[in-house]
Image (cartoon, rainbow, N blue to C red):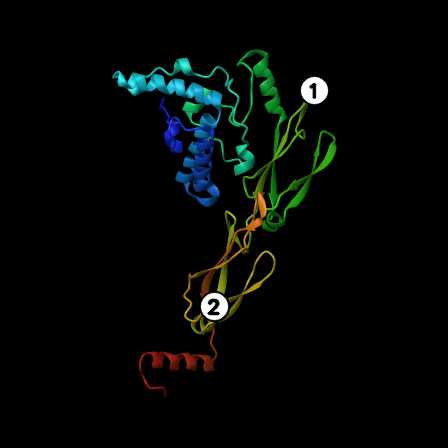
């Protein structure tokens, strides 16, 4: 098993206090957040590793156990031992009895805070993001399995327009109907926890988790809180300049095209993207990518004018 240096991962010293650890975690989590690095698998793995490190160092009990393990591991290395032969078995978790950091990474990051390493799972248990105080095996473990089985997941498909303004869905569960609110800014993978709306057991009721899936849009492509759209511009407007109409989720707006605009250029329309999930006053931008539209059918007069322009550009006299 590979030993993980969580202090090095967060870039803090072993003497760092709680505030320093939290500050370092937040800075790195923002930098490597999947929404800021769409499609970047390296950043996504880095993000998971950062969450794992904070799950340990951000909790005094977990940190104390980890520090004790680290002291023994490094002492073993200093004595000439092969790190690959270090005996981790005495440190294996007995049911994950440590109380976890009270941070719901699923709510904060759209369900992408999981994926703990084998090292973490063996030493601290696999119940990421949960608080548990029960031994493994016997009635305690049966109770935990029962509670897990009472939780349910429901995929909810919404349109991009619904994700922009927020929407609701009605569900039937346990013989009754209820309406759930899906907040503005929700994206594919966002999880919404509905407490007590899961399956029922003896004296217990689980939770329902709505897993959002935003359907593809015919015009817009989403990249985090930003939107991308193709804008067709005729050749004359691209050469001479002018204005074109650009679609947005709140209606079309005019975009000024400067003379000499090239195909592939992108114009940023501030605040015309998606609202931020946790702060709807913040909005992303709309990235309008220019596509030059070349005419395929010309009248005789248009063709004659283009031919004159061609001769002029070649320095030939116009007949």
The answer to whether 283 is drawn above or below residue 258 in the figure is above
Q: Where is residue 105 in the image (x, y as percent from the top left)?
A: 53, 33
> Which residue is painted at 43% across and 40% down in the image?
32
Residue extending furthest toward the left: 80
Residue extending furthest toward the right: 176
Horizontally, residue 103 falls left or right of residue 197, namely left
Nearest the eye: 292 or 80: 80
| Number of residues whose C-alpha sits closer than 10 Å to that of mark 1, classed few (under 14), some (14–19) or many (20 or more) | few
Horizontally, residue 319 falls left or right of residue 159, namely left
Residue extending furthest toward the bottom: 319
Which quadrant: the C terminus? bottom left
The answer to whether 251 is drawn above or below residue 37 in the figure is below
Q: Estimate the spatial distance between the alpha carbons at disc 1 and disc 2, rounded to whole Å.
A: 66 Å
The answer to whether 67 is drawn above or below residue 184 in the figure is above
Horizontally, residue 158 falls left or right of residue 32, namely right
* Label located before the other in sequence (1 or 2): 1
Which quadrant: the N terminus? top left
Element type where label 1 sits in the image: loop
Q: Mark 1 — residue?
A: 203
Q: Position of residue 287 (x, y in %)?
A: 49, 57
> Which residue is painted at 58% across and 40% down in the image?
212
Nearest the eye: 213 or 107: 107
Q: Mark 2 — residue?
A: 257
Q: Position of residue 229 (x, y in %)?
A: 50, 57
Q: Where is residue 111 in the image (x, y as percent from the top left)?
A: 53, 35
Element type where label 2 sits in the image: strand
**Location of residue 116 by image quarter:** top left
| Camera sees residue 122 | no
The reply to whether dot 1 and dot 2 touch (C-beta < 8 Å) is: no
């Amino acid at each position: 098993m590979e030993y993980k240096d969580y202090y090095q991962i967060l870039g803090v010293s072993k003497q760092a206090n709680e505030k320093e650890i939290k500050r370092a975690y937040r800075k790195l989590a923002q930098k490597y957040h999947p929404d800021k690095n769409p499609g970047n698998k390296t950043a996504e793995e880095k993000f998971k590793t950062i969450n794992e490190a904070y799950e340990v160092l951000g909790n005094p009990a977990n940190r104390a156990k980890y520090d004790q393990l680290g002291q023994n591991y490094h002492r073993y290395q200093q004595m000439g031992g092969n790190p690959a032969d270090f005996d981790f078995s005495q440190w294996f978790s007995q049911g994950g009895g440590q109380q976890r950091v009270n941070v719901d990474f699923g709510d904060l990051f759209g369900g992408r805070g999981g994926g703990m390493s084998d090292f973490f799972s063996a030493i601290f248990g696999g119940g990421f993001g949960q608080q548990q105080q029960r031994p493994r095996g016997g009635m305690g473990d049966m109770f935990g399995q029962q509670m897990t089985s009472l939780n349910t997941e429901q995929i909810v498909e919404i349109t991009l327009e619904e994700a922009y303004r927020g929407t609701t869905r009605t569900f039937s569960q346990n013989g009754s109907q209820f309406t759930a609110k899906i907040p503005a800014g929700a994206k594919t993978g966002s999880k919404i926890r509905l407490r007590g709306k899961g399956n029922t057991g003896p004296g217990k009721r689980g939770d329902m988790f709505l897993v959002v899936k935003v359907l593809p849009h015919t015009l817009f492509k989403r990249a985090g809180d930003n939107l991308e759209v193709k804008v067709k511009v005729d050749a004359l407007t691209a050469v001479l300049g002018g204005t074109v109409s650009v679609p947005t989720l709140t209606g079309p707006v005019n975009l000024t095209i400067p003379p000499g605009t090239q195909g592939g250029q992108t114009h940023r329309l501030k605040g015309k993207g998606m609202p931020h999930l946790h702060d709807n006053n913040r909005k992303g931008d709309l990235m309008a990518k220019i596509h030059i539209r070349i005419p395929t059918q010309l009248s005789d007069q248009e063709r004659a004018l283009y031919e004159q322009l061609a001769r002029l550009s070649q320095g030939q006299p116009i007949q």
